[in-house]
Image (cartoon, grey):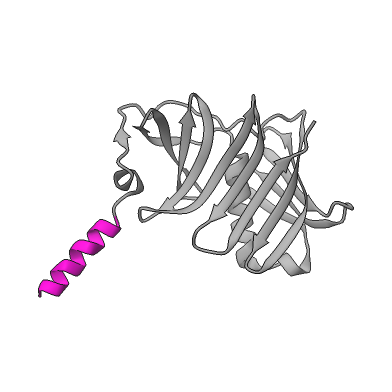
Amino acid sequence: MRFLLISFCFFLVSCGSYPKKKNFQAENSTSKEIENPYLSDSRIDYVYKASIDVYDRNFSGLLIIKKIADKEHRVAFTTEMGNKMFDFTFNENDFRVNFILDELNKKMLINILKKDFKVLITENPIISNSYSHNEIDIYEAAIYNKKHYYFFENYKLTKIINAKNGKENVQFLFLKINNHLANQIEIKHSNIKLTINLKSITQ
C-alpha cells in the first residue's frame, strides 16, 4: 500500500505542467498578440546552409523558405548543387509534399518535419496563457494541438519550446538575431535522434 501511494505521488509530480515545473509566474492577461518575425517577409528568400542529423544519417545542403502568400510558405531542401531532397508547401492548415527523396520518404519523419517547419513559419500564434520568469516573457500557444511556449527576452523571440507532460520535447533556438533575421536556428528533439542546424546565407 505504501509503495502504491509513493508511486501515485511520483506520478502526480512527474505529470506536472511545464510552467509549474519551471516555476513560471502566471500573468493575468492572455490577450496580447505576439509575432515570430524571422521568416515572415514575402520579399525575402530565406536561404540557410542546413545540416539535418536523423538517427545515424546526416543530410546537408541548402534550406530555402519563401513566404509566397499571406498564409502560404514553400520550404525546400536541396543539395548545394541544386538537387532537391524535399519540397513542401504550407497553406494555412493545409500541407502538401511536392517532392521528397526516397531516403527521407518515411511517414513518421515527414510528420515531424511538417510540425517543425510549421512552428518556424507560424507568425501570429493564438495565445492561451502568459507567464513571466526572470524578466523573460513566456506565451503559451497551440500548434497542431500541441503546446508551445514562446520566450521573449528584451522583446525578442529567442526560443520556442514544445512540451508534453511537463517535459521539453523540442527546442527551437533563434541565435545571432539581427533585426528580423535569425542568422542561426537550431531545432533539437529530445525524444528522437533528430537535430536541424541552420545558418543564414540570406543577403
Residue appearing at x 74%, y 44% in the figure: 74
Q: Is residue 95 inside the magenta stretch?
A: no
Left or right, residue 170 beside residue 2: right
Q: Tell me where residue 92 appears, x and y as whole percent.
A: 62, 42
| Image height of 88 relative to 65, above or below | below
140 or 198, which lies in front? 198
Left or right, residue 185 beside residue 87: left
Residue appearing at x 61%, y 47% in the figure: 186
Which image quarter: residue 91?
top right
| Image height of 109 relative to 137, above or below | below
Which image quarter: residue 20?
top left
Which image quarter: residue 121?
top right
Q: Is residue 14 inside the magenta stretch?
A: yes
Q: Tell me where residue 203 appears, x and y as whole percent.
A: 80, 30
Going by the picture, which residue comes out furthest to the left? 1
Q: Tell me where residue 143 appears, x and y as whole percent.
A: 51, 46
- Segment tinted magenta in the rendering: 1-15
Left or right, residue 55 beside residue 164: right
Q: Tell me if I can see residue 146 in this picture.
A: no
Quarter holding the N terminus?
Answer: bottom left
Q: Tell me where residue 187 appears, x and y as whole percent.
A: 59, 50
Residue appearing at x 50%, y 24% in the figure: 155
Going by the picture, which residue comes out furthest to the right? 81
101 or 182, which lies in front? 182
Q: Tell me if I can see residue 38 in this picture.
A: yes
Magenta span: predominant SS is: helix
Residue appearing at x 48%, y 24% in the figure: 154
